[in-house]
Image (spheres, rainbow, N blue to C red):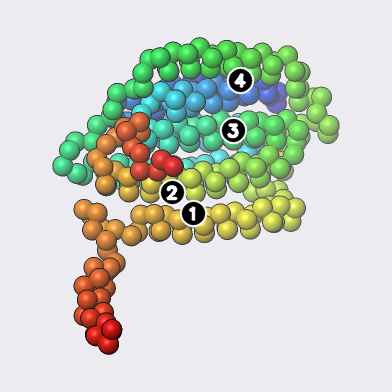
Amino acid sequence: MSIAPEQYIALSAVLFFIGVVGVIVRRNPLIMLMSIELLFNAANLAFVTFARVWSNIDGHIFAFLVITVAAAEAAIGLAIVAVTFRRTPHVDVDEVAALRG
Amino acid sequence: MIEFWILAILMIASAVFVISAKKPVYSVVGLLGNFIALAAMYLTLQAEFLAVMQIVVYSGAILILFVFVIALLSSGVTPFDVGPNRARGIGIPAAVFGVLALGAIVVTAIRSGIHAGAAPGGATGDAGVFGSVASFGASLFTTNLLPFEVTAFVLMVSVIGVVLIAGDEGPGGVPRRKKRRAIEREPIVKPIARVPR
């Protein structure tokens, strides 16, 4: 079995780039959260690729921890979105100022 | 390697669909395709346990959470629709710099010469050992036991945070706890206390 780590890393970079564009360009906070999930997944793909290249299981552990943090982030982010939209029915993150310091 | 290209095209197409869909529900569908393709990609990298975790946690828990929140928000009076994108003054420079950074990453990854044979120990040809549930669990519960327990703490903190953020008020912004009755009771008590003054 021959693996080509460069291809996997390049794919991870492409997915990360797509996620960054989604976070920057979209104004809907739900789609921004989904783009953040894309970022997490791109990082996970890089972790798993390096674990495979170096034959070290620690990359899998890192990916597991990232999945956990992503679950916590999604829960809290969606709670904030739900509470914010219950008060002001806007779907535009540029107009929401409730959390502004 | 044909499966890599099929999965890569699927993942890129679904990711582009996620960030370009009109409604968040369509984005969720695109995200589902991306997650399943990524799970299959984990299988090509001998990460069996992570592939299962990807489907169970992401496709089973996080996506359902997204669907619930979208359904909750779109059940209001106003139709839940997407706002316009940000100003193109932000989008176009972001895309240009993003493409440049992407090219730098790809070129660096190709030129840096990471090869499987050059790694210390080399890649294991043993398909049944590396990345299996047994090896993953052995590492997780011996070497990395502390991070695993910290994971439980992080999840507990997030659950408490969600309850504190979203659990305080019912629909319509009315506090679910009976704070108003306590306020109404205050005048009953206070005049009696103020009488001696």
Q: Position of residue A22 (x, y in %)?
A: 43, 26
Q: Which mark is residue A10?
A: 4
Gap in angstroms between the C-alphas marked 2 and 1: 7 Å
View extreme (front): residue: B197
For residue A9, above or below residue B172: above
Q: Quadrant of the C terminus of chain B?
A: bottom left
What residue is disc 3 on? A43
Q: Which residue is mark 1?
A: B158
Q: Residues within 10 Å of mark 3 (few under 14, many from 20)?
A: many
Q: Amino acid at mark 4?
A: Ala
Marks 2/1 in contact by CB < 8 Å: the verdict is yes
Q: Residues within 10 Å of mark 1 (few under 14, many from 20)?
A: some
Quarter holding the N terminus of chain B is top right
* 3 vs 1, front mark: 1
Q: Amino acid at mark 3?
A: Ala
Q: Check if mark 2's residue and mark 4's residue have beta carbons within 8 Å.
A: no
Q: Is residue B152 or residue B189 the one in the foreground?
A: B189
Residue A57 visible to the viewer: yes
Q: Is residue A35 left or right of residue B141?
A: left
The reply to the same-chain question for discs 4 and 1 is no
Instruction: First in sequence, mark 2 or 4: give its number.
Output: 4
User: What residue would you read off at disc 2?
Assistant: A75
